[in-house]
Structure formats: structure tokens, C-alpha cells
Amino acid sequence: MNTLLPTTVVGSLPKPSWLAQPETLWSPWKLEGDALVEGKQDALRIAIHEQTRRGIDIVSDGEQTRQHFVTTFIEHLTGVDFEQRKTVRIRDRYDASVPTVVGPVRRERPVFVEDAKFLRKTTDQPIKWTLPGPMTMVDTLYDDHYKSREKLAWEFAAILNEEAKELEAAGVDIIQFDEPAFNVFLDEVKDWGVAALERAAEGLRVETAVHICYGYGIKANTDWKATLGSQWRQYEESFPLLQSSSIDIISLECQNSHVPMDLIELLRGKKVMLGAIDVASETIETPEEVADTLRKALQFVDADKLIPSSNCGMAPFPRDIALAKLSALSAGTNIIREELAVSATRVS
């Protein structure tokens, strides 16, 4: 698209209260059967409508048709037993009961393709679809079959590539892989993480993105952040690798974080999806606060490669808070667009 500083949402948006419990991650559906199918489609329509009316340029499904950004995809694969559960440490941060890999993992049918086709029919704007990244998928399971995180990641990468190619054919303009695990398992990122991510994106003609953040605004994540010191430099490990990778867009957390802004320089030449909306606080950013974050970022990324966004998904927020934050994102971005237009006029 030709829009300067196109805005977007990284991941989830709150679901309608008639579809799932508000402000609750991984909430069970309140509907069943055909009513659930219809309810999900209605939620998709609402998500598109709200993003559009609040000035979001690259719209997404807001993850309205899935309960969890990782496990909903895994539920559709063979080789994973959701009844046989184990407690594992997720991203070295908190314990969770997870399904077990009991055999070869396979994708026998598309997972999100029909939803993507519906989304494509609903809007003429560019659309972005998110998929879990291979390493983050591995970190959300107990592996009793491959006995190797790397082997399992490569299997998932091939499966994700199949899904991504069908999403591309369905009319998706940007395919985003979510890899919060990249901020934790830094040695694995170097050894095989980026390579597995590139395998997931192999052969795609549409733009690809990877989202690396510090997690939803839940207590386990905020407690972990409190241990990271005055500067969060995890990106310093992955950014040079991603700068030389085949991935087109790198998404990072920024607003109200301790990420040094100059780390963006390590991505020079790539598009940067910059988190200018905090998902760990219900305080609504002012447009000027958003604009200030973008101004700082523009010291290290060219304006034609900057995509303002949220830090992470907003599913745990009350809907009115999340939507107000979308409005703040677009209003703050418009301030910078106007400043850049004035600057360009002066130069000419």
C-alpha cells in the first residue's frame, strides 16, 4: 500500500461478550455448532468495522475465531493428544498444562483459510494474518515423540508453510509469525530458530513479518519484565540475524518498555512494525505520546519502512479500552504524517 506509516494491530482484539468471556485469555466459546460459526463471522465483521472506523490501515481478524494464538492452530494437527496433558514451563516464565506430541505432526486440512477468505470478502483494505512461529509452538507443548525441540520446530515450519501458502492464495497481504520465544531462548534463535522461521515463510510472494514481544499484559509476563533490569536488550541477539534473513517486517515491543530505541538500527533496511501502544496498562495513550514514540523511532528507521502498531495482542483488555487505544494509535500517527508532509514541503 502507498499510505505513509500504515497502522496495524499486532494480534488479538477483545471478543464480543456474547462470543466469549470478556477480559479473559483463552475463554471458552459461549456458542456451539452453527451458532458458533455465525458468531465468529459476526465478530470478524465487527473487528473489521472497528479497525476501519478508528483509522487502522492494515486490518486483521483480531484473532476472533481462535481461543489461543498457538493452541488453536495445533488443535487442527494430528500427532498431538490434548487429553494427555503435562505441566511444562512456558518460556521459562510460568507453568501450564499443555497437550502432548505423541506421534508425527501433520496438517491434514487448512486451519484458518476459510476464515481468511471471509475476511478478504469483508474488506478492500490490506489484510494481515497471524500464525504462531515454529519455536513458540514447540514451547507450548510436551514432546514425547521427537524428543528434540529443533526436530519438532522443523516439522512445524513445514506445516506452517503449507498453511501460509494457502492463506496467500486466499488473498492475505501480509503473513505474520508470532515468536515471543525469540526473546527467551537466545541460543536456539541463533542455532535454528531463524532458519526454521525462514522455512515457514519459504516461497511466499506476499510480505512476511515476525512479531517478537515480551508477552500479553498478564502477571506472569509483567513479573518477568521486572527482572530484566533497566534495559531490555534481548533484541540485540535476534535483530542482526533477522536483518539478514528473508523476513520482510520485524515487529517489536516499544511503548512503555525498557527496549533501547537505538536497537532498531540493527534492522536497517527492513520494515519495522513498532509497538506504540502499551498492552500491559489500561491507561489510554494520548496521540502526542504515540507521536513521540514514533518520532524517536524515526531516528533509526526510514519513514517509508515504519508501521505503527500495538506492542502485542489486546484480548485481555475491556473492549472500550482496546478500541480507544486504536484511535490513539491512528491519531498519533496522523500527527507524524503531517509533520513529515510539512518537512517535505520545506525541503522541496
Image (cartoon, rainbow, N blue to C red):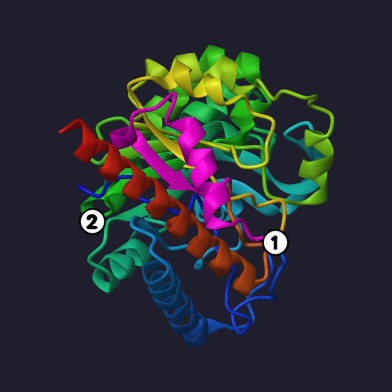
Quadrant of the rendering where the C terminus is positioned: top left
51 over 182 or under it: above or below: below
| Outermost residue toward the left in this view | 348
Q: Is residue 300 left or right of residue 230?
A: left
Could you say where residue 242 lies in the image, as x and y percent from the top left? Answer: 44, 21
Q: 10 Å neighbourhood of mark 2: few (<14), some, or many (≥20)? A: some
Q: Which residue is mark 1?
A: 25
Residue at 57% over, 31% down:
135
Q: Is residue 58 visible?
A: yes
Residue type at numbered disc 1: Leu
148 over 219 or under it: above or below: above
Residue at 55% over, 12% down:
191
What's the CA distance linking mark 2 and mark 1? 29 Å
Q: Camera-side residue: 244 or 185?
A: 244
Could you say where residue 316 lies in the image, as x and y percent from the top left? Answer: 68, 62
**Of callouts 2 and 1, the N-terminal one:** 1
Residue at 49% over, 46% down:
291
Task: Please tell me the numbered disc located at residue 171.
Answer: 2
Q: Magenta residues?
A: 284-311
Q: Is residue 299 magenta?
A: yes
Residue at 44% over, 23% down:
300
Q: Is residue 158 left or right of residue 78?
A: left
